[in-house]
Amino acid sequence: MSPNPPLDWTAITAEAIEHFKALLRIPTVNPPGNERPAADYLARIFEAEGIEHTIVESEPTRASIVARIRAKNPSGKGPLLLNGHLDVVGVDREKWTHDPFGAVEADGCIWGRGAIDMKNMVTMSAMTLVLLKRARVALDRDIIFAGVADEESGSNKGAVFLVEKHRELVQSEYVLNEVGGHTLHMGAARYYPIQVAEKGICWFEITAEGEPGHGSMPHPGNAVVRIARAIAALGDSRLPQHASPVVENFLRTIAKGAPFPQSKVLPLLLNPRLASTLLEIVQRIEPDRAKGLNAMLRNTASPTMLDAGHKVNVIPSRASAHVDGRVLPGMTEREFLDEVQRVIGPGLRITVREQHDGVEFTTDTPLYRAIESTLAVHDPGGVPVPYMIPGFTDSFAYARLGAICYGFSPVRLGRELEFTKMYHGHDERIPVEGFAWGLRVLYELVRDFCARS
């Protein structure tokens, strides 16, 4: 183990929070993104510490920054990459308690768009490199930080761009990314989901064509009515259930700590004959949890945009709907679209607009075991558990490098805050103490995993 001088975590946390708030105040809403000011801010931090870094742009203002600390005595082990996206989703300002770009500290939390998704991980990762450099920790593998653009719109101008055009900057053996490492309370038990799998996307358009005509004379071939029926069918249906081993293990594990009746209901969700009825019951009691459970058990297709007509008194010859499809790891685009087609019926055209496969990573690695060990030190009563998110992250891009990716952006949350309500939601915020806890957990995990024995 490399030398481990005592660190002043009070001072370190104050420094990290200063950087965190500064990043939250930079409005990197995507679209349009404009991540360059955030990348420039991080570059100034690395420049002051003498840490090697570079900024690349996929197009003007769409910037990603990559920094690296090199191993002093390389052992042949591949680098560990800490990833965080710099862009954030939009806000409805009038529905926020505090300015979403004000980085207000109130009620024990720091409020702002990106507080959980994911400028917290950006800050913790950057500070991890800073602390390792200051402590002169002898490493046996390189540590890379990537603060990337465009994750919220598909990653093409960020992580995908780095993988395809600047592979040498981000080639790594392991990646730590977002959506994992947060506290999940079930009864008296505390779990820490570690993301080891994520769905792919299949964003597609459904098009209905029909006979045009005057709006005063309805007819059954109206394209708007046909597309409406297709959308209603998708909204009223659940696609077939496919419980993966990761999801099965996750549900059975958290059921052990759940109170009755959740302790009985969760495992029964794995039975396709019972799942729909049980999900309806859960929906009435805990609608947010029901949405997440449903999405883990099957492919999903959510209509999100409509396009039809140009004049109120003209029945158009064409109507279309854009649909956000999420596909389980291991399933093909064709298998997914066949499921959709069976729901919406024949005579409608499906056109895929963007697609990438889901990914799943093994837990039988030294890094996963290191995550378990670190959590055992910082929360001995907490239980790490592998899980799959129903969305996607930049991990699908890094998987193309052959990297093993885990979602582990540690934050300790109390019962009053539910992680899934924070990202993309109103009043996104993070507890100050939970951020400080995560900062130390991430640093010690990376230090112990990458330090020379």
Image (tube, rainbow, N blue to C red):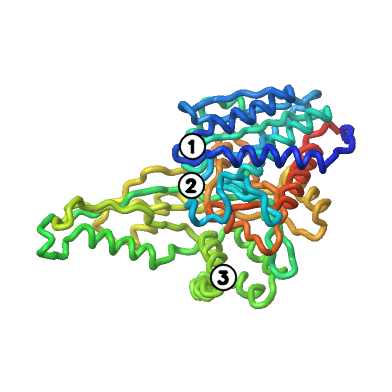
Comparing 243 with 160, the one in front is: 160
Label 2 Cα crowd, 10 Å radius (few <14 / some 14-19 / many 20+): some
Q: Secondary structure at mark 1?
A: loop
Residue 268's x, y, as percent?
Answer: 59, 72
Q: Secondary structure at mark 3?
A: loop
- 225, above or below 282, in the image: above
How far, Cα to Cα, is label 2 from label 3? Answer: 26 Å
Q: Amino acid at mark 3?
A: Glu
Comparing 9 with 218, the one in front is: 9
Residue 213's x, y, as percent?
Answer: 11, 57
- Please give the name of the residue rendered at 80% of the width and 41% of the height, measured from the top-left corner: 444
Are the two marked residues, 2 and 3, in contact with CB atoms closer than 8 angstroms? no
Q: Amino acid at mark 1?
A: Gly
Q: Is residue 340 left or right of residue 130?
A: left
Label 3 Cα crowd, 10 Å radius (few <14 / some 14-19 / many 20+): few
How far, Cα to Cα, is label 3 from label 1? Answer: 34 Å
Are the two marked residues, 1 and 2, in contact with CB atoms closer than 8 angstroms? no
Label 1 Cα crowd, 10 Å radius (few <14 / some 14-19 / many 20+): many
Which disc, if any, is residue 33? 1
Asked if one can make out residue 385 in the rendered structure from this viewpoint, the answer is: no
Disc on the earlier residue, 3 or 1: 1
Which disc, if any, is residue 90? 2
How far, Cα to Cα, is label 1 from label 2? Answer: 10 Å
Which disc, if any, is residue 286? 3
Q: Tell me the quadrant of the picture where the N terminus can be found.
A: top right
Q: Amino acid at mark 2?
A: Gly
- Please give the name of the residue rendered at 35% of the width and 63% of the height, measured from the top-left corner: 343
